[in-house]
Amino acid sequence: MMIVMKPTADEQEVAAVVQRIESVGARAHVVVGDELTIIGAIGDREHVARLDLEGAPGVERMVPILKPYKLASSQFRHGQRTVLDIAGRKLGGEHFAMIAGPCTVESREQTLETAHAVNAAGATMFRGGAYKPRTSPYAFQGLGQEGLRLLSEAKEQTGLPIVTELMDLRDLDDVLEVADVIQIGARNMQNYSLLTEVGRSGRPTLLKRGLSSTLEELLMAAEYVLKEGNESLILCERGMRTFETAYRFTLDLTAIPVLKELSHLPVVVDPSHAAGRRDLVTPLSLAAAAAGADGIIVEVHPRPEEAICDGPQALVAGEFGYYMERVQAAAAVAGKVLSETRLAA
Ligand code: PEP
Ligand code: MN
């Protein structure tokens, strides 16, 4: 349920509504907008149904949130989009973010070389996995804590915020030492205890859509993070499983405008895992940017033929500058500006 306060409502009136919501065992999420304050009452349906705030001081009206996801819904923000500020880099609204880096942190040389290359080309953030969700338990599983250390060195040297995946709750504290954005991978999209803890951590989070998940399932997973009070959440379309086998997954471009219609959260696209092939990464990135994505997360390697993981889909670091220029032009078509450029301006 949403309680829309009158434009004249004061702090005491808002506090009284919050108290009333909590007294029936629901949680209150206060969103102070430019013109209106909206209070979300989130909890068990029976608890929320017991609220009767029509006519209470400062209350304009009560509006039910019709979708099963509440805090993630566009309705909850009255059409206002969420814009995140991640270590000074904006993402969402008119701000387009380019998150680039290797699939996995392999070595000091490979990590730093890639970080410097993508930074020089104007990337907004650096990605790289220290913990890797591999299909085979016999495949390289990531460098773990040593990988995190190399990521923090990359951050120190370039200033780029770090996006890195968390797979296991036992690694949360270590990942929090380094990650500006915690990535929840496609395979963990519905790992609800992981989502809850990441929500409690308050750290910006990038949530990838599961391999065969509907948009509603993605938004319900987002709700687990938001419900813990973590509003810094990014949704990521990374390709889904279809009957087609000519490429790795099928990038669902339609998800971009539809997620933005259903939710106020920013939407980024991962063309690398969708394509599985380097030659497809540029066209998919251009399409995603032109369709209104708030950013791209893409794999880059200095020597993809030597990559331990996902080499065939990695862009070559030396060619990344030209790729960036083209994607920026496509983002401009959708009215967006690269956030790093804005920072420098
Ligand atoms: C990744 O980003 O390296 C990754 C493993 O992605 P996904 O979870 O989308 O497969
Ligand atoms: Mn990968």
Image: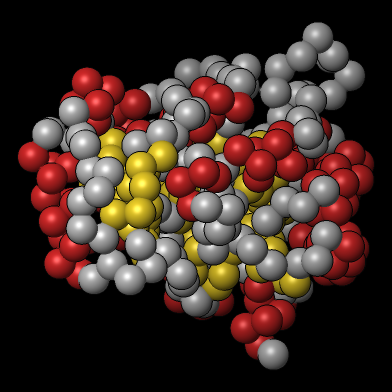
How many discs mark residues in the rendered view? 0
Taking the spot 66% from the left edge, 76% from the top edge, the residue there is: 340
Judged from this view, the residue extending furthest toward the bottom is 345
Is residue 302 visible in the rendered image? The answer is yes
Looking at the image, is 46 positioned above or below residue 307? above
Is residue 307 visible in the rendered image? The answer is no
**Front-lying residue, 29 or 85:** 29
**Image position, residue 253 (x, y; %):** 79, 36
Q: Where is the N terminus found, in terms of image quarters? A: top left
Give the quadrant of residue 131. Answer: top left
**Image position, residue 11 (x, y; %):** 20, 69
Q: Where is the C terminus found, in terms of image quarters? A: bottom right
Taking the spot 66% from the left edge, 73% from the top edge, the residue there is: 339
The answer to whether 134 appears left or right of 197 in the picture is right
**Image position, residue 258 (x, y; %):** 70, 36
The answer to whether 232 appears left or right of 47 in the picture is right
The answer to whether 46 appears left or right of 334 in the picture is left
Taking the spot 29% from the left edge, 36% from the top edge, the residue there is: 42
**Front-lying residue, 333 or 182:** 333
Judged from this view, the residue extending furthest toward the left is 23
**Front-lying residue, 258 or 301:** 258
Looking at the image, is 163 positioned above or below residue 228? below
Looking at the image, is 8 positioned above or below residue 276? below
The answer to whether 228 appears left or right of 162 in the picture is left
**Front-lying residue, 91 or 53:** 53
Query: By what rule are the colours in the image chosen?
Result: secondary structure
